[in-house]
Each structure stands twice: as structure tokens, then as C-alpha cells.
Image: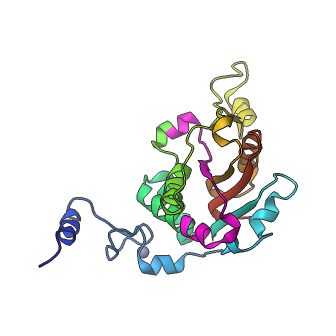
Amino acid sequence: MMPLKTIWNDFSHLFFPHVCAGCGTDSLSMQAALCIHCMNQLPLTNFHFHANNPVEKHFWGRLPLTGATSLCHFTSGSLIQHLLHQLKYKGNKDAGYFLGRMMGNALNESERFRGIDILVPLPLYAERQKKRGYNQSAVLCHGIAGIMQLPVSMDAVVRLSATETQTRKTRIERWKNMEGKFELVKPADLAGKHVLLVDDVVTTGATLEACGHELLKAAGIKLSIATLAHTV
Ligand SMILES: [Zn+2]
């Protein structure tokens, strides 16, 4: 006799189509958001094993880090771009959670990321999060947390909103001025801990740098960074 769970999984497909976030095939396990073919296509960096990897070098002289890594290389028009788009604009939180779990497995493989105490997603502007309904970096964090068994801090640091201050400036000026402004509101939550700051993709690194400097205001913290993809 078929186990009840299998029957339910088959049955539930009728209501919630479960397809690969990469290619759309429905031949994948219930627990996966990507099929085997797409998983094999992911351009993994293996940076987590290597000190002085390109992401770490990118922050040299800008932000003192214990370690930094990205799970995948980003190339335009590729599977990883498609997955980032699914995560950021198509509401595909399952894909983000699954990719976060892959990040967690990678981090767990490396001695270099053993001492992490708490995960912090790069905050979004409140307006953007409201519009999207979630923070994609927080989704990745929850995936990582499930594997590494670590807490996620959702409110220790906030991204300042352009709409709340500087009312005399134009809208564009306000945006420029507030890009990458963060405020550490609960330093005690992070004091003395090794914090892993998580984002979806690192490009210039300016936003992570700004948020990282704010986090480093908490007493005695160590800071590392992990992203799903990098373009550095
Ligand atoms: Zn696929």
C-alpha cells in the first residue's frame, strides 16, 4: 500500500502545482524547489573553503570581516539570474528557502564559518518590504537557519526610510541621500556575537558595507557575510 504521505503529495499537486523554479519541470521531489538537472547546473563557487576568496578581497580595506562567501557565480541570462528573479519579483519563497538551505549546507562544510552565532538579513526599506510582502534575504536566512540551527535577528538593524526625513529635498535627492543608510536599533541582541550578514547578491558591495559598519557598532562583535550570488 502507498504511504499516506505519498498519496497526499500526489494529490496536493492538483491544487498546488509543485514545479522546478529553474526549468518548470514537475519531476522533482516534494522537498526540493529545483530539479536534479538544474541543481547540477548551478555555478557553485566553493568560496566558503577559501580564505582570501574574491568576495573577501572585495571588502578588503572597506569592512573588517572574519569571512565572506557567495554560493554561486552570477552571470546574466543564466539559471541563477532566473532564480534571483523568481525570489525577488515572483514571490517564489520556496526557491529562496531551498537555496538558503544549500547555503547552510555549504557553510556547515567549512571550518571557517563554524563560530557563527546569529544570522542577520540585509534589511529592505519598509515600503519595499510592504510591497513585496517579504524580505528575500530573510527567506534565505530562514533556509540557512534550518540547516545550521541558528537564530535569525529580524529587527536588530533597520534600513532608514527616505520618506521620513529631509522633506525639503526632492524625491530623487532623498533617495540618493538615503541609499544604504542603516541604524542599529538593538545592539544588545548582537553584542559579543559572531554575526553572519546575509543578502541575495553582492555587486558593488556598497550596501553590505554600509550595513556592516552599522552592525560593527555593537560591542565585541565579529562579522561575516554570505550571499547567494556574486558579481565581484
Ligand atoms: Zn529544473
Foreground of the two, 118 or 48 = 118
Q: State which quarter of the image contains the N terminus.
A: bottom left
Query: What is the x, y in percent for residue 83?
Result: 50, 64
Residue with the most extreme right position: 61
Q: How is the image coloured?
A: rainbow
Where, quadrant-wise, is the C terminus in this rendering?
bottom right
Determine if the magenta segment contains residue 113. Answer: yes
Q: Is residue 72 magenta?
A: no
- At a point 48% along the width and 52% down the height, the residue shown is 89
Q: Residue at x 61, y 73 (%)?
A: 109
Query: Which residue appears farthest toward the left when viewing the image?
Result: 1
Q: Position of residue 97 (x, y in %)?
A: 46, 59
Taking the image as shown, residue 8 lies to the left or right of residue 200, namely: left
Give the magenta part as a residue range. Answer: 104-129
Residue 212 visible here = yes
Quadrant of the image occupied by residue 181? top right
Count of numbered tags: 0
Left or right, 43 with respect to 143, comes to: right
Q: Quadrant of residue 53?
A: bottom right
Q: Nearer the viewer, residue 190 or 182?
A: 190
Q: In the image as oriented, which residue stretches furthest toward the top?
A: 168
Query: What x and y, as percent, mark residue 56?
Result: 78, 63
Q: Which residue is painted at 17% across and 70% down in the image?
A: 7
Q: Is residue 95 rendered to the left or right of residue 225? A: left
Residue 74 can be seen, yes or no: no
Q: Residue 173: name its quadrant.
A: top right
- Residue visible at 55% across and 48% down? 152
Depth check: 185 or 210 in front? 185
x, y percent for residue 167: 69, 19
Specify the quarter for ligand 1.
Answer: bottom left
